[in-house]
Amino acid sequence: MASCLALAVSPAAALDQEFAAQLLESAKNIERDAGQVSTALKSKALNADDVRSKVEAMSGDVTKLQELVTRFEEGHPQMSQRDAAEWKQVKEKVQLLEIFHGQKQKLAAGDLSKNRTLLRAHADGVARRALKLQQTVTRLQKGPLS
């Protein structure tokens, strides 16, 4: 009987681990890409097309984070108060990444020479927020949401 219960519990736990792994992967990709944008903007030989392509590369991971958040909320309509509070942290961090990335896209679409310093600051901000999201997800992995 105990082994049946263990088998019944493990698929849900594995799903939560898989979900967390997907969140972590997207956040790591965003952090890496934002760091590359920041580094490219430091270069004296600024390659505008390279910067724009790196900014665009992040869009897929930002979209994936949005989809993961939506999918999780659809699959967990009723969470405990504790889980809802912890999930809210993840959701807010994803929303901040969306906002910063959107602003960065607008800046990259404009005159990079003019927006270079501001764009670099936004890239650094995205990298920091992606790292914070990774830290939050890692912390929540230790006590998966129900």
Image (cartoon, rainbow, N blue to C red):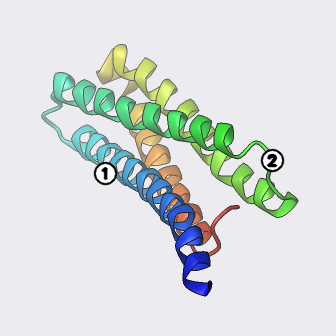
Q: Position of residue 70 (x, y in %)?
A: 61, 35
Answer whether labels 2 and 1 touch (C-beta < 8 Å).
Answer: no
Tag 1 residue? 32
Where's the N terminus, which quadrant? bottom right
**Dot placed on the residue nearer the N-terminal end, 2 or 1:** 1
> Label 1 is placed on what type of residue?
Arg
Viewer-closest of 119 and 7: 7
Residue found at the very far left of the displayed protein: 45
Dot 2, how many residues are within 10 Å of its Cα: few (below 14), some (14-19), or many (20+)?
Answer: few
Q: Position of residue 38 (x, y in %)?
A: 32, 44
54 sits left or right of 70 in the view: left
Q: Measure how far apart labels 2 and 1 are at the Cα level.
A: 34 Å
Vertical placement of 122 versus 14: above or below? above
Res. 54 image quadrant: top left
Disc number at residue 78? 2
65 sits left or right of 54 in the view: right
Where's the C terminus, which quadrant? bottom right
Secondary structure state at the residue bearing disc 2: loop
Disc number at residue 92? none
Residue found at the very far front of the displayed protein: 1
Q: Residue at x 53, y 51 (%)?
A: 129
Vertical placement of 71 versus 32: above or below? above
Viewer-closest of 75 and 145: 75
Q: Residue at x 65, y 42 (%)?
A: 75
Q: Residue at x 42, y 51 (%)?
A: 22
122 sits left or right of 71 in the view: left
Res. 52 image quadrant: top left
